[in-house]
Amino acid sequence: MRRALCALCAVLALVACGSSSGSPAAKALRDTAKRLDDVRSATMDLKMTASSPSAKDGVGFSLSGPFALPDKQGLPVADMKVTELRGSATSTVSFVSTGQAAYVVRGSRVTALPATSVGVGGKGGGLGTLRIDSWLRSPSLAAGETVDGVETDHISAGLDVATAFDDLGRLGEKLGVATLAGLRPLDAEAKARLAKSAASSHIEVWSGRKDHLLRKLVLTVTLTADVPPSLRSLVPVTLALSMSLADVNQPVHVSPPQT
C-alpha cells in the first residue's frame, strides 16, 4: 500500500480555473497567491492519507516542523519530521538542515546529505510554488476561524486535482523532503491519469484577513477510475490532505543533530 500511495503522490496534479475574476472570493484568492512567496519561514503541519472502504487501515504520511527558506541559492533551515502512517503503525525520519549542512536522522543514525541534493533557490522558489489561484473552481468566500491567533478569510471551492499535487510535489523539493515524503512533481502522464481518476474533489483555504498570508488548507479527492493497478481493488480511494502554517515569518534556529 505504501508503494501505491507513493505512486499516487507521483500522480497527483491540479489544473483549475476560478470563477468570475472580479468576485470577492477570486480577489481574496489572488491576494493570497501573490503573497505565498512572502512566507519565508513557518512551522508546518502537513498530513496526507489514502483510505478506502475495502482496506482495513489507511496509509499516508505526515510532515511537521519549522523551516526557513534562504533568500539566495542554498540550504534551508529546517527540522522536519516525516512520519509514515500505516494504520496504527508509524515510523519517523527527520530531515535536519542548519543552512550550512543537511542530515537525515533515522533513530540514532545520522547521515549527512550533499548540499546539492537539497539546495533550494531564493525568492520565487518557496510557497509561491503553490499556485493556489489556479487550483480552485467557482470559489466562495466567508469569514473564517481564527488560525494561529490571526483572523482569516475562508475560501472554499471545487478542485482541479492534477496541478495542486504537482505543486505540492515541487514544494517537497523546495523543503528538501521530496524523497522522504514521496512528494514529487508529476509528469504529463501522471497528471492525465489523476485528472481522469478524480470523481470528486474539494478544497478549503484559510488566509489572513489583513495580511493575506496562507494559514491553512484542506483538500479531499475521491478516485474511482483509471487508478494504478496496485489500487484497483481498493477503489473508491479517498485522498485527504491538510496543511497548516504557524509562527509565519518568525526566526528559525536549528542545531546539527547529535552524532
Image (spheres, rainbow, N blue to C red):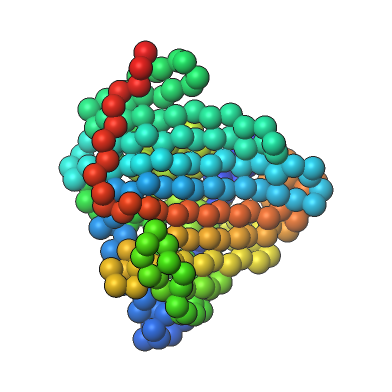
In terms of image quadrants, where is residue 152? bottom left
Q: Measured along the vertical axis of the image, is residue 24 above or below residue 202?
A: below
Residue at image location 65% in from the left, 66% down from the top: 200
- Location of the N terminus (image quadrant): top right
Please provide percent x and percent y for residue 135: 47, 66
- Of residue 60 and residue 125, the one placed in the foreground of this image is 60
Q: Relative to residue 32, is residue 20 drawn left or right?
A: right
Please provide percent x and percent y for residue 40: 26, 50
Q: Relative to residue 257, is residue 231 drawn left or right?
A: right
Residue 251 visible from this viewpoint: yes
In terms of image quadrants, where is residue 252? top left
Please provide percent x and percent y for residue 3: 64, 35
- Of residue 227 and residue 202, the one placed in the foreground of this image is 202
User: Residue lying farthest left?
Assistant: 72
Residue at image location 41% in from the left, 17% down from the top: 110
Residue at image location 75% in from the left, 50% down from the top: 52
- Location of the C terminus (image quadrant): top left
In terms of image quadrants, where is residue 74? top left
Please provide percent x and percent y for residue 26: 40, 79
Residue 3 visible from this viewpoint: no
Residue at image location 40% in from the left, 18% down from the top: 111
